[in-house]
Structures are given as C-alpha cells and as structure tokens.
Image (tube, rainbow, N blue to C red):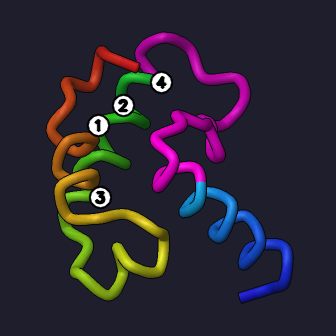
C-alpha cells in the first residue's frame, strides 16, 4: 500500500476505537438514488465476505463488519 492509504487506514482505526463515526469513503459521484442504493448493496455484500485478515487490514472487527453489512441498502 502507498503511504497515504496507510495513514487513512490508521486514522480510521483510531476513529473506530474512539467510537467516532467518520466517513472515509463515499459513493462515486453522479449516482442517482437507485445507483446509490445499488452501490450500498454491493459494497455491504462484499464486506460480509471479507475474512479476518482482510478485516484487520481495514481496521474493522467482525462485529463492526457484520453490523454494517447487514444494514438495509436503503439506509445510510
């Protein structure tokens, strides 16, 4: 990974430990309402398929990934 990516992951990990809700990633620009919902559905489905090592790489616990991954696609 590049230096900037490492810093972002470290900052996200610290924010999660402190209980802060920060948005690090957002949906691609120009998506309509339906596109945004489809984007959420796909990314949440992918999140549920990550293994422990991958979750550790992005600074999430299994419980955090499960909570986010099981949210309905129409909810932010």
Q: Residue furthest front?
A: 18
Dot placed on the residue nearer the N-terminal end, 4 or 3: 4
Q: Which residues are magenta?
A: 15-35
| Magenta run includes residue 53 | no
Check the image and report above or below for 26 versus 5: above
Residue at 71% from the left image edge and 88% from the top image edge: 1
Choose between 74 and 58: the one closer to the eye.
58
Residue 65: which quarter of the image? bottom left
Residues under numbered marks 4 and 3 in contact, where contact means CB atoms less than 8 Å apart = no
Dot placed on the residue nearer the N-terminal end, 3 or 1: 1
Residue at 56% from the left image edge and 14% from the top image edge: 32
| Magenta run includes residue 21 | yes
Dot placed on the residue nearer the N-terminal end, 2 or 3: 2
- Left or right of 62, for residue 36: right
Residue 62: which quarter of the image? bottom left
Residues under numbered marks 2 and 1 in contact, where contact means CB atoms less than 8 Å apart = yes
Question: Which circle marks residue 47 in the picture?
Answer: 3
Mark 4 highlights which residue?
36
Residues under numbered marks 2 and 4 in contact, where contact means CB atoms less than 8 Å apart = yes
Secondary structure found at label 2? helix
How packed mark 1 is, by other alpha carbons closer than 10 Å (few <14, some 14-19, many 20 or more), is some
Mark 2 highlights which residue?
38
Mark 1 highlights which residue?
41
Q: Which label sits in the foreground, 4 or 3? A: 3
Check the image and report above or below for 23 versus 64: above
Alpha-carbon span between mark 2 and mark 4:
5 Å
Question: Which circle marks residue 13 in the picture?
Answer: none
Q: Which label sits in the foreground, 3 or 1? A: 3
């Amino acid at each position: 990974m590049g230096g900037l990516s490492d810093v972002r992951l470290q900052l996200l990990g610290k924010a999660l430990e402190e209980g802060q809700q920060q948005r690090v990633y957002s949906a691609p620009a120009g998506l309509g309402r339906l596109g945004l919902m489809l984007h959420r559905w796909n990314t949440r489905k992918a999140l549920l398929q990550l293994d422990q090592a991958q979750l550790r790489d992005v600074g999430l616990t299994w419980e955090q990934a499960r909570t986010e991954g099981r949210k309905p696609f129409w909810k932010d």
